[in-house]
Image (tube, rainbow, N blue to C red):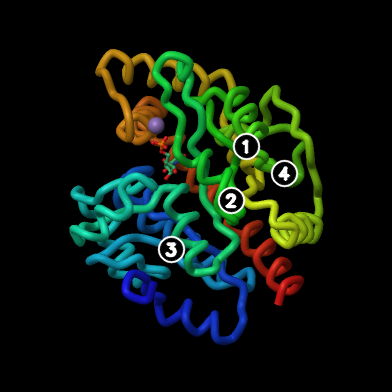
Amino acid sequence: MKEYIELSAEVLQAKEEGKAIVALESTIISHGMPYPQNVKMAREVEQIVRDNGAVPATIAIIDGKIKIGLTDDELELFGKSSGVAKVSRRDLAQIIATKKLGATTVATTMICADLADIKIFVTGGIGGVHKGAETTMDISADLEELAQTDVAVICAGAKSILDLSLTLEYLETKGVPVIGYETECLPAFYTRNSEYQLNFSTDSIDVIAETLKAKWELNLNGGAVIANPIPEEFAMDEEYINGIIGEAIKQAEENHIIGKDSTPFLLGKIKELTNGKSLDANIELVKHNAKVGAEIAVSFNNKTK
Ligand code: PSU
Ligand code: MN
């Protein structure tokens, strides 16, 4: 494994000191947001994790290695470069073998975090079952990863470019807990609410940490989704954003955008059609997830060390 994995100095020190560590993904930087807001977001999110008592580990593939923790220059590189590959489980070995620059999706960040024994991972939103998946079969590899890899993902739910109902059904089939933090329903990323009630909600960070501990000590393999709604003051108007999402999906269909290009296309289109307002909301919800995720990581670390 040493041949393939490299921990940053900060992460290495955190490991030695037994500190809580929070994994962060890099596809959100390279394919999820434009430059330079993406790099600014990545740095701020790392700092929020530190300010809340944990150590950030942004994960990416560089020069044939899985990097756990990036330097400032590396964050800049992923934000700026156009030739970064979006790396899902399918692509990981090949991107390592060919020494390409690779940004990790939720699925691949989970794989790499698990390899480095990091159990808590913060992002914006997970991939899921796309609208129309009954004919396109476009279902994110993130869901299969949640089914099998022992990492908890703190996110703001899933956005309505996806079929939220089918995404929840899929997670239920695969035995993935979806825990609402301070919400009774699945948050829809840009908005706090959706019509989908969750099975399990709590206002307690400790209960979330205790739940994860019990799950994994019982060898109930797989991840968990911790759904944390966007703060009220940054939430978007539901009707407005759903109209925009509908238009973005229409344009994706007209342009025959499929496969791994689908989600980045939709995110870019939504940003364009909202004149950047969706990006502001996206950044704020990730920052809030970073705070909650760091708190969960600290609590989990205290219970398991
Ligand atoms: N949702 C977002 N921003 C993102 C992504 C999803 O709001 O950047 C990225 C994540 O890396 C996620 C990936 O894992 O898109 C899912 O891609 P796909 O739908 O192709 O599986
Ligand atoms: Mn897909």
Q: Quick check: marks 1 and 3 in contact, CB under 8 Å?
A: no
Amino acid carrying mark 4 in the image? Ile
Residue under numbered circle 3: 58
Q: In whole angstroms, how far apart are the C-alphas of marks 1 and 3?
A: 27 Å
Q: Quick check: marks 1 and 2 in contact, CB under 8 Å?
A: no
Q: Is residue 252 above or below residue 66?
A: above
Residue under numbered circle 2: 153
Is residue 132 shown left or right of residue 65?
right
Amino acid carrying mark 3 in the image? Thr
For the residue carrying disc 3, how many other residues have a C-alpha within 10 Å: few (<14), some (14-19), or many (20+)? many
In what element is the residue under mark 3? strand
Dot placed on the residue nearer the N-terminal end, 1 or 2: 2
Is residue 40 shown left or right of residue 217?
left
Residue under numbered circle 1: 174
Residue under numbered circle 4: 179
For the residue carrying disc 4, how many other residues have a C-alpha within 10 Å: few (<14), some (14-19), or many (20+)? many
Q: In whole angstroms, how far apart are the C-alphas of marks 3 and 4?
A: 24 Å
Dot placed on the residue nearer the N-terminal end, 4 or 2: 2
Residue 12 screen position, x and y as percent: 47, 81
222 or 247, which lies in front?
222
175 or 288, which lies in front?
175
Of the two numbered discs 1 and 3 in the rendering, the one whose residue sits closer to the viewer? 1
Q: In the rendered view of the protein, which quadrant contains the C terminus?
A: bottom right
Q: Quadrant of residue 172?
A: top right
Figure quadrant, ligand 2: top left
Q: Quick check: marks 3 and 4 in contact, CB under 8 Å?
A: no
